[in-house]
Image: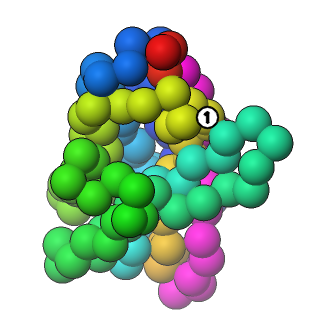
C-alpha cells in the first residue's frame, strides 16, 4: 500500500506565498511523475504542476513564473512553492504520484488534499 500525505496549506492574503509538501510512503520501488492538482469550489480538479523523476517540469499556464515544483527523490517528497497568490487559486490542493510498487505493479495515488484559502 502507498500513502501520500500533504501539508502546508492554510490561509494567506492575496499576493502572499505558501509552500506545500507531499510525502509518499509505503511499498514504493520508484516514483515517476509527481504532481499537484487543484480543485476549486464547484469546479473540476485541474493540473497545477508536475515533475518527473529526472526533474522535467510542466506547469499550468496560469501559474508559470509564480509557482515552482521540486522534489527530493531520496525522500519521496514533492514540493510546490506558490508566490503571488490570487483569490482565484483558493481550493483544495491534491498531491498525485505515479508509483511502481515493490511488487512491480504501477498505479496512480492521491493524497487527501490540503486546503489553500487566499483572501482578497
Q: x and y percent of residue 7 in the render?
A: 44, 29
Identified at 76% across, 49% down, the residue is 43
Identified at 21% across, 77% down, the residue is 56
Residue drawn where x is 30% and y is 38% of the image:
82
- Say whether residue 105 is magenta: yes
Q: Secondary structure at mark 1?
A: strand
Identity of the residue drawn at 48% across and 78% down:
100
Residue farthest along the right direction in this orientation: 42
* Depth order, front residue of 8/102: 8
Question: Residue at the bottom extreme?
Answer: 104
Position above or below: 12 against 47: above
The one nearer the camera, 16 or 97, is: 16
Tell me if 19 is positioned left or right of 10 in this view.
left
Residue 115 belongs to the span the image colors magenta: yes
Quadrant of residue 19 in the image?
Answer: top left
Asked if one can make out residue 30 in the rendered structure from this viewpoint, the answer is no
- Label 1 sits on residue: 91
Quadrant of image for the N terminus: bottom right
Question: Bounds of the magenta span?
Answer: 103-117
Q: Main secondary structure of the magenta part?
A: strand
Percent coordinates x, y for residue 107 in the rendering: 61, 77
Q: Nearer the viewer, residue 54 or 3?
A: 54
- Give the residue furthest to the front: 120
Q: Is residue 100 above or below residue 118?
A: below
Above-or-below relation of 105 to 90: below
Residue 90: x and y in percent read 56, 31
Q: Give the colouring mode of the picture.
A: rainbow
Amino acid at each position: 500500500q502507498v500513502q501520500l500525505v500533504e501539508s502546508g496549506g492554510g490561509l494567506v492574503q492575496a499576493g502572499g506565498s505558501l509552500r506545500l509538501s507531499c510525502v509518499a510512503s509505503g511499498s514504493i520501488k520508484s516514483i515517476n511523475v509527481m504532481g499537484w492538482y487543484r480543485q476549486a469550489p464547484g469546479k473540476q480538479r485541474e493540473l497545477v504542476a508536475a515533475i518527473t523523476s529526472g526533474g522535467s517540469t510542466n506547469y499550468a499556464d496560469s501559474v508559470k513564473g509564480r509557482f515552482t515544483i521540486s522534489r527530493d527523490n531520496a525522500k519521496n517528497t514533492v514540493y510546490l512553492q506558490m508566490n503571488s497568490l490570487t483569490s482565484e487559486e483558493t481550493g483544495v490542493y491534491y498531491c498525485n504520484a505515479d508509483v511502481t510498487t515493490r511488487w512491480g505493479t504501477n498505479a496512480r495515488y492521491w493524497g487527501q488534499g490540503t486546503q489553500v484559502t487566499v483572501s482578497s
